[in-house]
Amino acid sequence: MPVLERYSYRAACLLAVSLLAAGLTACTTTEDTASPAGPVTESKGPVGQVPGGLDTFYGQSLTWGDCGPFGTSDEMRQSFDVQGAECARLRVPLDYARPDAETINLGVLRHKARDPDERIGSLVTNPGGPGASGMVSAASTGIQVRNNPIGQRFDVVGFDPRGVGASQPAVTCLTPAERDADRADDSEVDGTPEGVARQEASEREFGEKCAERTEYGAKMLANLGTRDVVKDMDVLRSALGDEKLSYLGYSYGTRIGYAYAEAFPGNVRSLVLDGALDPEQDSVESLVGQGEGFGVAFGEFASWCAEQQDCALGGDAAGATQAFQRLAQPLIDNPARVGDGRSLSFEDATIAAVQALYSQQLWEPLNTGLNELKTGKGDTLMLLADTYNERGADGGYATTQDAFAAIRCVDDPRVTDKAKIREAQRRYAEVAPFLDDGRPDGDALDSCAFWPVPNTSEPHLPSVQGVPPALVVSTTNDPATPYQAGVNLAKAMKGSLLTYEGTQHTIFLQGNPCVDDAGIAYLLDGTLPAEGTRCSG
């Protein structure tokens, strides 16, 4: 069954553009080709309280220049090729307990405020994951907000968290060929004792490869999680010259936001948290909650599809789950052909469906792909699955999947109780039956159970005394981060809940005036929407 949510809306936007040939839309990431000036070094820190032994990091200069060299793939370099974007590297300790030892570098991208005289400060953003590139997200966001008060009064800043994207070193676990082979092989997902043994051996090997292939090995993996990312973000705040942090976090980025608030309560100016993770849920409960979200979103897709003349699932939404299973389950033994010579597996087909459920913009491509599947073709579904997995046209992969697994394994306690795993499988199948592969459930442990280093965080209610109220945005039919998680986080943060009535993953700065106006007002001067405010499309 799928693991926890991956990232925010951005990939859905980019894929919708490529599939629907929509041209430049609200999801656009480029405007005019960038014409970077020569490098400029700025020294603005240290600002605010500096933890012991970290003076050189908090007071470091940042040299801003062309973003091109920061791209680790053609897709990433294309994302950075936008007017006004400039990039720098931030140096941080590998292990904050030993700041005089090894250091690592984080990639940072900035769009400067268009009205310097009215500048408030920096707005630091994170798109989620864990493992998604904050630099890529900020490149896009900076263009989207260019002509609204955020772009005029804030420097929009995104950083690639440690181990991710342009940051050095990046987490490295599987080669592209190994990733392709893993996606194509459905045989390991087998509930028989033999199948469980194969799967657990593969999961153990994955962790071993991550430790072997990532620079600094287990030491890097041990200092990769949210605990350390929020410390990096405070170093960034100081180096940027901001007394207090203004932050926008989507999806898993909300966890970074509330963890930062707990670690540095006196350094928070404002927090917009959209698509929340519930801070008290463990990984199993989060997984089941997410499954329920995807199940509801699939029902919404099925209802829409039933009204289309060419609905691949038929005209009866009530039978959509069975119709989807009839199309997808045969792929276990007979993968569909794909134009580039690869084959579409059951895993890829279900991941394609999950990717499409993140946004209604992808419902039409999902229906197209399911209709293609009836003829034995898997091209459109593979494109959806490739986008989820961030596989480039050259066959290479972004760091996201490897980083996602590594961060997840240190952010939460490992699950080794097989009875708990079986119960989670049963509950997940009940709330998201369309993803059922038709085979007996197993109780295989995942890679985190064999991870070479211990976890550094665990679910808990954050202590946020003295932190300004946060603005939490939650969508009623969010497929990846359920609505109730936002309700719970708003209460935990003693903040304000803004409800969006819709079916998609995250909504702020995506063109809904009701949501955008409320969020902008809060970021500008701290004004929170009235209690019970609800927005719709």
Image (tube, rainbow, N blue to C red):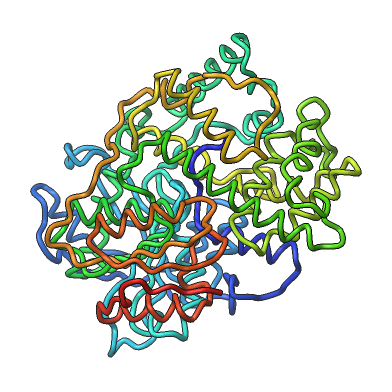
Residue at far top of view = 194
* Left or right of 470 on screen, residue 110: right
Can you say whether 458 is above or below 478 in the image? above
The answer to whether 356 appears left or right of 118 in the picture is right
Relative side of 256 to 139, left or right: left
Q: Nearer the viewer, residue 92 or 124?
A: 124
Q: Describe residue 331's horizontal placement relative to residue 502 as left or right.
A: right
Give residue 23's position: percent from left, percent from top.
Answer: 71, 74
**Residue at position x 31%, y 32% in the image:** 222
Looking at the rendered image, the quarter that the N terminus falls into is top right
- Classify the position of the C terminus by image quarter: bottom right
Figure check: 516 above or below 498: below
In front of the other: 464 or 237: 464
Q: Is residue 350 above or below residue 73?
A: above
Residue under the image location 17 percent in, 69 percent down: 243
In x, y percent, where is residue 476?
Answer: 49, 60
Count the labels in the image.
0
Residue at left offset 91%, top offset 44%:
375
Q: Quadrant of residue 15?
A: bottom right
Quarter of the image where one finds residue 466:
bottom left
The front one of 422 and 6 is: 422
Residue 6, image x, y percentages: 51, 47
x and y percent of residue 143 in the render? 50, 76
